[in-house]
Image (tube, rainbow, N blue to C red):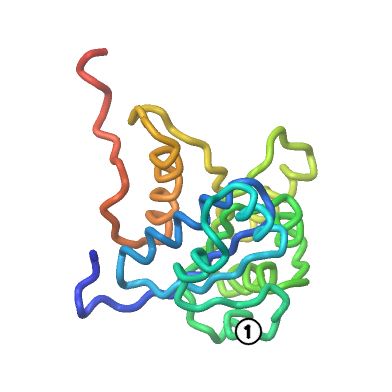
Amino acid sequence: MLATPSAPLKHVVVAISGASGAVYGVRLLTLLRNIGCVKTHLIVSEAGWLNVAQELDDSRADVLALADVVYPVHVVGAAIASGSFQCDGMVIAPCSMRTLGAVAHGLSDNLITRTADVMLKERRRLILMVRETPLNLAHLRNMTSVTEMGGIIFPPVPGFYHRPQTLLEMVDHSVSRVVDLLGLPQEHAQRWAGLSTKI
C-alpha cells in the first residue's frame, strides 16, 4: 500500500463500456485498490459485461469485488450523477465510440454518460480510453469535441521501449499512465530513463 494514514481519500469513477479492452478497466480497478487512498465507484454497461465475459476469465463477481461502490448503469439518480458529489476523476476504460459520441454531445442517457457530463461541467478530470480502429470522421470530431470541453482522449496505445514480455505488461503501460493523469501515487509505472547507451 502506498497510502499513509493521513493521505486524503480520493474518489475515482471507473466505467467499463462496450468496446473491446475490458482488461483496461479491470486492471485499473486493481491498481487503484493497491494504492490504498482511493475509493472506486464502478459502472459497467450491458455491452461492457458482454466483453468482460468474452475477453476475460474474471467472473462478474470478481470484477464487482474490485470496486468499493457499484452502480447499475441505468440508475441515473445515483450520487455520482450530481456535481455536488465530490469526485476527483473519472476514467472510461475502455470507451466505445457510442459512449464517446454520447459524451461529446451531452447525451446523459445512462449513468456512464451522465457522470462524464458532470465531470466536464464541474471541470474535473475525465479520461476516455477510446478503443476503435480505423477511425472515421465522426470519431475524430467527437474526440475533438471532448478535448475542447476539457476531457482527455487516451487511446491505450502500447509503448515498446520498455520491451514488454507479456500482455499484462502492455496493459499496465497504458493503465499506469492513466493513474499518473489522475495525480495518484504508484509503484507500477515504468519511467523513461533516456536512450540506451547501446545506441
Q: Position of residue 106 (x, y in %)?
A: 75, 67
Quadrant housing the C terminus: top left
Using residue 99 as the reference point, say whether residue 167 is left or right of it.
Answer: left
Which residue occupies 55% across, 53% down? 152
Q: Amino acid at mark 1?
A: Ala
Closest to the observer, 1 or 102: 1
Question: Residue 166 location in percent, x, y?
Answer: 40, 34
Q: Nearer the viewer, residue 53 or 19?
A: 53
Residue drawn at x 68%, y 73% is: 73
Residue at 78 percent across and 37 percent down: it is 136
Up the image or down, 78 lies above or below 113; here it is below
Q: Residue at x 52, y 37 (%)?
A: 157
Asked if residue 2 is positioned above or below residue 163 in the image, the reply reads below
Q: Position of residue 105 (x, y in %)?
A: 77, 61
Viewed as shown, does residue 167 lie left or right of 21?
left
* Quadrant in the picture for the N terminus: bottom left
Residue 195 vertical position relative to residue 53 in the rendered view, above or below: above
Residue 66: percent from the left, percent from the top? 45, 67
Q: Which residue is under mark 1?
A: 78
- Name the residue furthest top: 199
In terms of secondary structure, where does tag 1 sit? loop
For residue 137, side relative to residue 154 (left or right): right
